[in-house]
Image (tube, rainbow, N blue to C red):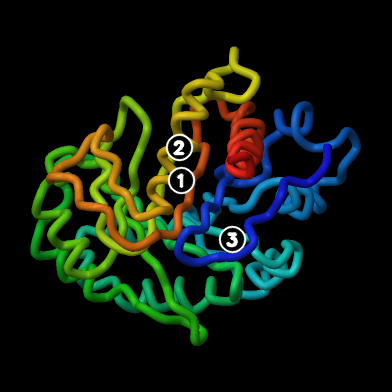
Amino acid sequence: MSPAKKPVSAGAGAVHVGVGGWVYAPWRDNFYPAGLVQRLELEYASQHLTAIEINGTYYGAQKPATYAKWRDQTPPGFVFSAKAPMRIVQSRNLAKTGKQVEDFVGGIAELGDRLGPLVWQFEGQGRLQHEDFAAFLELLPRQAGGRRLRHVLDVRDAAFANAELIALTRQHELATVFTDAEDHPSFADLSTDFVYARLMRTQAGQATGYAPKALAGWVDIARRWAAGEDPPELPHLLAPQKTGKPREVFVYFINGAKERNPAAAMAFIAALGKR
């Protein structure tokens, strides 16, 4: 299978598409070539996808040298998103995690121009408090290694996913995750100059994860996001915004029938190239 066509540039109007992680045994039967050694899987994946969300950092930050190695194994234009460590996002006092945030960001900055958004995933019901959460947002650095940092909030507390949250994200120019799933809050309110979407309904019985019509629908949504639109048919906490400036878009096929996610991402990338 030939590598997927890469976007010609990053920034406003670009759409990056990928999966969560790159080490998954079933992918050795339907994505990676037979006999490919595991140490070459990232290199192969980065030639066929345009982005990967790193899951492992949620369980523990890596050494800077590891991030540098991942950077060097991927081609120009490829982007990593990364989950922040759970020891930070599960803290009972988020406002006092500044040193931990600094340490995480300082290390992952070694990804250099491969570094995309950092994802702060908050689980559970009733744990988040407005004042503590607002103070935490003040801690998030906007630059590292001379490069802009982008932050995404994945708030999985349905009671906390409200208009006040959107007001905070717009104040701080942070994104929230749009999630296509049944078991997490799903809202597509836009807050900054990029969009972050997780598509989590891939099905084992579909060769490309989503049925062709459904996949085409999400490709259309991604194009509209990139063009500056705020599609009103998606769920929102506040009224959709009017069409504005182009946005950078990140789309990840996560969970669902995970064995189908690389095929879904590659089909999505291929469809983006057809107009």
Question: Eyeballing the image, is 132 above or below 46?
Answer: below
Most foreground residue, 214 or 104: 214
Question: Eyeballing the image, is 67 above or below 59?
Answer: below
Residue type, mark 3 in image: Val
Most foreground residue, 139 or 100: 139
Image quadrant in which the N terminus is located: top right
**Element on which disc 3 rests:** strand
Which residue has dot 1 on it? 223
Q: Position of residue 246 (x, y in %)?
A: 39, 60
**Are the residues at dot 2 and dot 1 in contact (C-beta closer than 8 Å)?**
yes
The CA distance from mark 1 to mark 3 is: 18 Å
The CA distance from mark 2 to mark 1 is: 5 Å
Q: Position of residue 229 (x, y in %)?
A: 32, 49
Find residue 79 and name its label. Answer: 3
- Name the residue: 68% across, 43% down: 23
Residue that sits furthest to the top in the current view = 205
Most foreground residue, 160 or 232: 232
- Name the residue: 22% across, 68% down: 136
